[in-house]
Image (spheres, coloured by chain):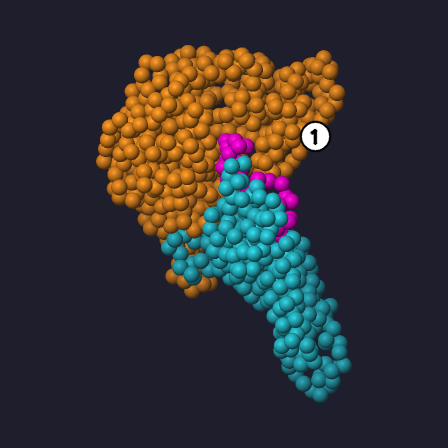
Chain colours: A cyan, B orange
Amino acid sequence: MTRYVLKRLVGMLVVIFLVLTIAFVIVRLAPGDPAALMLGPEATPEEAAELRTQLGLDRPIAVQYFAFVSRAVQGDLGTSLFFRQPVTEVLAGRAEPTIFLSLFSLLFALIIATPIGIYAAYRRGSFLDQAAITTAMLAASVPSFWTGLMFQRYLATDLGWFPASGYGGPDASFLDRMGYLILPSIVLGIVNSALILRFTRASMLDILGEDYVRTARSKGMGEARVVLRHALKNAAIPIITVVGLTFALLVSGAVVTERVFNIPGMGNLVVSAVLRRDYPVIQGTLIVVATVYVLINLITDLLYLLVDKRVKY
Amino acid sequence: MRLTKLRKAGVLAALLTGSALAVPAGAAGTIDVAIIGEADTFDPMVSTKDVVSIVTQHFVETLYTFDSGWNIAPLLATALPEISEDGLTYTIGIREGVSFHDGSSMDAKDVVASLKRWLEVASRGKLVADKVASVEATGDYEVTITMKEAYSPLLSLLAFSNSAAAIYPEEIIAETIENVVGTGPYMIAEHVPDQYLQLVKFDDYVSRDEPSDGAAGARQQTVDEIRFVPVPDPNTRVEGLLSGQFAFADSLPAESYQRLEESDVADPMLLKPFGWPIFAINHKDGLLTDKAIRLALQAALPIDDMLFAAFGDDNFFLTDGPLYPEGWAWRNEAGTELFNQNDQAKAAEMLKEAGYDGTPLRILTSRQYEFHFKMAEVAKMALEAAGFTVQMDVVDWATLGQRRNDPALWDIYITHSPFLPEPALTSLYDKTSRLGWSNPEKDQILTDFTTETDMEKRKALFADLQAQVFEDVGFIKIGAFNALSGTQAGLEGVTATPWPFFWNVALPE
C-alpha cells in the first residue's frame, strides 16, 4: 500500500504541475488589463503601461512563467496584484470560512440524505420512496443561487432567524463567525443532499437484492441489523466516492453561495480575482483547488480499505 | 445601531452554535456601511476609483473640499487662497494644530511634499503638473503655488477626493505609500481584505468651526466606529440593509426601491440626479473620425427609449440634454436642440450624403453595469433602422478597460460619470484623452475656459464648449440617471452624494 500511496503522490505532483501551467497560460490568454483596473477609469493608457512595467506584466510570457514556476516550487505563489499581499497569505485568510462551510454543508447533506436514501431503498416503491426521489430531483434541479436568495430573503431578512450575509466584524468570535455559515450551509447542504440521496438509494437497492442479504434474513437476523450492518457496509463504496467528490467540490469553492451570502471564502475570492484580473491569486487558487481535489480523491480511495477488506492496493 | 431583527437573527444562530450571540452586537455608536467592493489602496492619490474616494475621505484630508452646493471650501487650508491678479500665484494658509494619525503635527513642509508627490503620481495631478512652476513653503504654515500659466480648475483638483491631493506627513512620502497616515476624523484600526475595514475615532482630531455643509465645515465624530463592508452583490446589499445588518448600503438596484419604501427597517435614499451615461466616441481612428457620420449617429439615437430600457422607471432617469443638471452653475441650453432627435430617417439621409459604406460601427460595452448594455441594445436597433451596420462587442469590465486604450478596437465605448463639480475634472474634453477629440475651435475654447478666472466668463465659455459637444459630436450624453442607496430607518445626517461620508451621522436612539 505504501508503494501505491507513493505512486499516487507522484501522480499528484504531475497533476499539480499541469494545472499550474494551464492556469498560467489561461489567465494570460484572457483579455483584460489588471493595471487599468487598479488605476481606475480616469487613468491614461500611459499610466496603465507604467504600472504594468512596475508589476512585471510587460515581461515576455516565458520569463514570467519560469519566474512563477521557480517560486512556486519553493512554496511562493507570488504576490496578489490587488491586495499587495503574498498569495499564500490571501488564500490562508479564506481557508476558515470555506473549510467550515464545506464541512457543515456536507454534514447537513449527510444527515438528510443518508437515512432517507437507506429508507427509500428499503421501502422501494413506497410513497416515501417516491417522495424522496421527487424531492431529490427538485433539490438538484433548482439552482443554488435561487435557493440562496429565497432563504436569505425569507429566513434572514423577513423572519430574522439568521444573519443575512457576511462573516462577522472585528468583534466576532469563532462561534459568532460559525453562526454566519449556518444558512449558507443549509442551502448548499440541500443542493448536495440530492446527489448523495440518489447514490445511497441506488447503491442500497443493488445490495439489498444480493444473495447474502437474503441469507442473512433467512437466518432470522433482525431487519435493522441486515440493513445497517450488512447492506450499508457493502453499499458504502459508491457512497464514500460521491461524498468525497462532493466535499472536494465544496472546498474548491462554493462560488455562487459564497457570493450570495458574501462569505469571504475561496469561491468569492476566485470570482473577484477573475474580475480584477489578479493573475497570481487565480493561479494560486487553482493550484490549491487541484491539490485539495487530488488529496481528497486519494483519501477516498484509502477509505475503501477501511470499509471493504476485499479492496487491495 | 443594531436592530431588534439582527438580535433575533443572533438568537437562532446562537442556539445552533452555542455562542452567546451569533451576530456580534457591535459597540454602541458603530455604523456598518455596505460598499460595492474592496478598495485596493488606501492612498487616494493613486486611484480614480469612487470606492477608494468614499473610504479614504474618512482618514485622509485635502487642503480644500466641496460644500453642498459644490462650492470650494477650505479643509486643511485656513481659508480660500489668495490668488494674484494674473492667476499665477496661489498663497495658501495652512491650519495650525492639526495632527496626523501618527501623532506628528502638520505644517507647510508636509503640504509641499504631498503636493509634489500628487503632481508626480496622481492622474489628476499630472493633468496640471506641466502648468506648475513651483510649490514652496513660504512660511511654517503657508504654501505658495506658482503657475506657468493661469489654470482655473486648480482649486477644484485640490479639493476633489478622487485622485486626491491628499496631505500626508513628509516622512512617509514615497512613490508607493504602504501605510497611509492622514489627518481625518477617523483612522484605520483593522483591515481584513474582502471582509471589513474598521475605522475608529481619531482622538486628536481638530474639526473646523464652521457649520457642516456638505463635506465642508465641521466634521463631528458622531459615531465611535465606521466599518466598511465590501458586498459586491447588489441584492446582498439590499437584504443586508433590510435585515438591519447595515446602517447604509450604497448603489442599490432600482428594483429594490419599493421594498425599501415599504420597509420599517430601512429607507431609500435617492441621489437625484447622480450622473450621466456617456457614449464615448473614438476620434482617433475608425468610422467616427468622420464628422458627418458622427452627426448621423447623434440624429438616430432615441435617448428617451434608451433610458427607459436601461432604468425602467421614470423615478430613475431624466431625458435631459444639457451637460449639467438644473440648479448647477454650469447649466446652459447651448446646442441641446441636437439632443434626443430620435430621427432615423434623417440619420439615413445623412449617412447617404456622407457616403457611408456599411463599415460596422463597433460598440464596446459590458454587462458589469447592466444599464450600459441595455442602452446599447436599444441604440443598436435605432442605428440599424437608420442604416448603420452595428457590431456589439460585449465584454467584461476588465476587457473593456483594456480595449478602450487601443483606438483600433472600438468606435464607441459606454461609460458613465457622476456630475463633477468642475467641468475640467473630466478628461472627455481634452484632446489628450483616449477619445482624442480635437478641433481648433473646441481646443481654443477649452484653453480659454481653463485659463479664465472670472466665473461669469467661464460660464459663457462652458456654454460654447457644450455647443461644440453637440455640433461636433465630441461625445454623447445619454440623459441623466439617479442613484439609489439605502439607510437604516432613523439614521440622520447622511448626505446624498456620489461619495457618501459618515462623520456627522447620527444613529437613531
Q: Is residue B91 magenta?
A: no
Query: Circle 1 sits on which residue?
Result: B391
Q: Decide if residue B458 is on the left or right side of residue B370.
A: left
Q: Could you tell me residue B448's position as x and y percent? A: 45, 14
- Secondary structure character of the magenta stretch overall: helix
Q: Is residue A9 visible?
A: yes
Q: Decide if residue A53 is on the left or right side of residue B208.
A: right
Determine the residue positioned at 66% across, 15% down: B292
Using the rendered view, name the quadrant where residue B45 is placed.
top left
Q: Could you tell me residue B17's position as x and y percent? A: 45, 63
Query: Front-most of B372 and B455?
Result: B455
Q: Could you tell me residue B53's position as x and y percent? A: 42, 36
Q: Is residue B265 visible?
A: no
Q: Could you tell me residue B240's position as x and y percent? A: 47, 46
Please tell me whether residue B509 is drawn above or below residue B269 in the rendered image.
Answer: below
The span picked out in magenta is: A23-48
